[in-house]
Image (cartoon, rainbow, N blue to C red):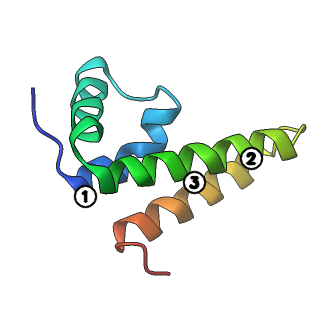
Amino acid sequence: MTEFDCQETKRHVHEFLHNELNESEIEDITAHLANCDSCEADYDMENLINGSIKEACDEVPPQELANRVLAEIRRIQANGGQH
């Protein structure tokens, strides 16, 4: 098991929420979240945002739009949250 640090955990929280990681990565992130209040707060916020989006949107967005939004979120995360 490779231990995920905060940067790695925050980079993969979206995929974690959507079950897009392998079993080992899920275990690593779960272990990190259990011991890191900062990452747990980020996880909670991402989870809240995802839930709000699901409630507000009853249509599936075009795949191109979804890909662009996800790419922008990843770009922001890679830059440490700076736009």
Indicate the position of residue 19 as horizontal and vertical percent values.
47, 26
> Which dot, 2 or 1, sits closer to the camera?
2
**Element at label 1:** helix
Residue furthest right in the image = 58
Q: Which mark is residue 7?
A: 1
Specify whether 6 is left or right of 50: left
Q: Which residue is mark 2?
A: 52
Give how far apart the Cα atoms at labels 2 and 1 are: 25 Å
Q: Residue at coordinates 41% horizontally, 44% vertically from top-left?
A: 13
The answer for how far apart the CA atoms under marks 3 and 2 are is 16 Å
For disc 3, the neighbor class at 10 Å (few under 14, some 14 to 19, many from 20) is few
The kind of residue on which mark 3 rests is Leu
| Rendering coords of residue 27 (x, y %) | 25, 24
Q: Residue furthest top?
A: 23
Element at label 3: helix
Vertical side of 49 occupied by 74: above or below: below
Mark toward the start of the polypeptide (3 vs 2): 2
Give the amino acid type for the residue marked by disc 1 in the picture.
Gln
Indicate the position of residue 67 as horizontal and vertical percent values: 62, 51
Q: Residue at x 21, y 41 (%)?
A: 35
| Above or below, 45 relative to 23 | below
Q: Residue at x 65, y 44 (%)?
A: 50
Q: Is residue 48 left or right of residue 54?
A: left
Instruction: Name which residue lies at 32% across and 22% down.
Output: 22
Tag in front: 3 or 2: 2
Check the picture and name the quadrant holding the N terminus. Answer: top left
Tags 3 and 1 touching, CB below 8 Å:
no
**Mark 3 — residue?**
70
Q: Which sits in the foreground, 82 or 64?
A: 82
Relative depth, front residue between 40 and 64? 40
